[in-house]
């Protein structure tokens, strides 16, 4: 059975208590995103991993990659950690992926109590793949293989995959408090997006169309230009370095953040292009069509 294996990055640096809270928040954000995008999926929290079962894996990937905190995603085949079953699954998995004349390697990592080590797992899975593809003249290259088969063994479960889909990483929205973003141009949108990536829950003010931010936080709130929200910890401004001398800090009684102050207009434009392209591929667009 194919599942999505979802990894995070910075959360793993935290202590157990904080990590548990942030993992729970990330799971909530994944479920909220799937619901908003109309993706039928079941999310399970594991050890430093989330596992997603979905009827449409492509839609689930396009949805999950917008969730801040997600560092990478892999489409993995799931089986038990039993050596015989793991070898059988790896052999089956490899048959449609091995290419004649291409070299391969197996990278294995293991957590839990097993009768084999990570190195032994890599060896016997490699043997299974070799024997299943003798008609393709398999060759092993542990330094620079053409094809890499990854194996993760977690207690009673094992996962086999080939590719990493890298995402935005960062921190789950809602772990770093509330801030208010004044948005009047693309630089303002990107500034708010970057603070969201750092885990902030953003209130949006301004008359510029910032609806694209809803793709990254389905629960984002748009408020009036003079509204002041409770629990607000600061303000976000989309200012360039050239605009800083004209900024009046006395107009604010809370910290003001300038996430894009070190970026040129061309860098802002390029990043906004990436964000818009990703949002255009969102499964939510299919719901709205």
Image: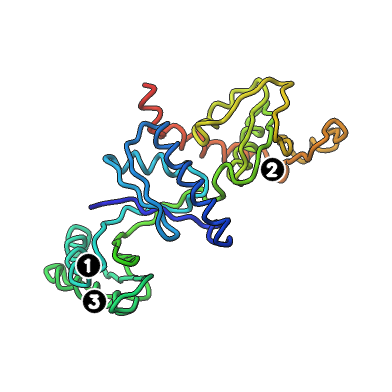
Comes first in the chain, label 3 or label 2: 3
The reply to whether residue 148 is visible in this rendering is no
According to the picture, the residue beneath numbered tag 2 turns out to be 259
Q: Look at the image and tell me in which quarter the C terminus lies.
A: top left
Q: Are marks 3 and 1 in contact (CB under 8 Å)?
A: yes
194 sits to left or right of 41 = right
Q: Nearer the viewer, mark 3 or mark 1?
A: 1
Mark 1 neighbour class, 10 Å CA radius: few under 14, some 14 to 19, many 20 or more: many
According to the picture, the residue beneath numbered tag 3 turns out to be 124
According to the picture, the residue beneath numbered tag 1 turns out to be 86
212 sits to left or right of 284 = right
Element class at badge 1 = helix
127 sits to left or right of 224 = left
The reply to whether residue 277 is visible in this rendering is yes
- Identify which residue, 137 or 279, lies in the foreground: 279
> Mark 3 to mark 1: distance in Å?
9 Å
Element class at badge 2 = loop
Q: Are marks 3 and 2 in contact (CB under 8 Å)?
A: no
Residue at x-position 56% and y-position 49%: 171
> Mark 1 to mark 2: distance in Å?
47 Å
């Amino acid at each position: 059975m194919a599942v999505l294996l979802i990894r995070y990055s910075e959360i793993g640096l935290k202590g157990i208590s904080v990590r548990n809270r942030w993992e729970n928040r990330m799971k909530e954000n994944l479920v909220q995103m799937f619901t908003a995008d109309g993706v039928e999926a079941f999310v399970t929290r594991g050890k430093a991993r989330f596992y997603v079962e979905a009827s449409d894996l492509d839609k689930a990937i396009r949805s999950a990659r917008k969730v801040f905190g997600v560092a990478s995603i892999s489409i993995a085949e799931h089986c038990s950690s039993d050596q015989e079953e793991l070898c059988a699954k790896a052999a089956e998995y490899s048959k449609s992926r091995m290419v004649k004349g291409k070299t391969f390697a197996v990278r294995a990592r293991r957590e839990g109590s097993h009768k084999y080590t990570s190195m032994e797992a890599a060896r016997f899975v490699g043997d299974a793949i070799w024997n299943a593809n003798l008609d393709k003249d398999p060759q092993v290259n542990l330094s620079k293989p053409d094809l890499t088969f990854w194996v993760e063994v977690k207690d009673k479960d094992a996962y086999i995959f080939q590719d990493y889909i890298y995402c935005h990483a960062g921190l789950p929205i809602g772990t770093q408090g509330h801030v208010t973003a004044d948005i009047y141009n693309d630089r303002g949108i990107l500034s708010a997006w970057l603070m969201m990536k750092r885990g902030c829950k953003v209130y949006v003010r301004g008359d510029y169309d910032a609806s694209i931010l809803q793709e990254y936080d389905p629960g984002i709130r748009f408020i009036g230009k003079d509204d002041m929200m409770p629990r607000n910890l600061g303000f976000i401004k989309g200012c360039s370095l050239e605009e800083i001398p004209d900024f009046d800090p006395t107009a604010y009684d809370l910290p003001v953040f300038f996430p894009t102050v070190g970026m040129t207009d061309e860098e802002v434009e390029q990043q906004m292009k990436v964000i818009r392209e990703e949002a255009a591929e969102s499964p939510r667009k299919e719901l709205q069509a």
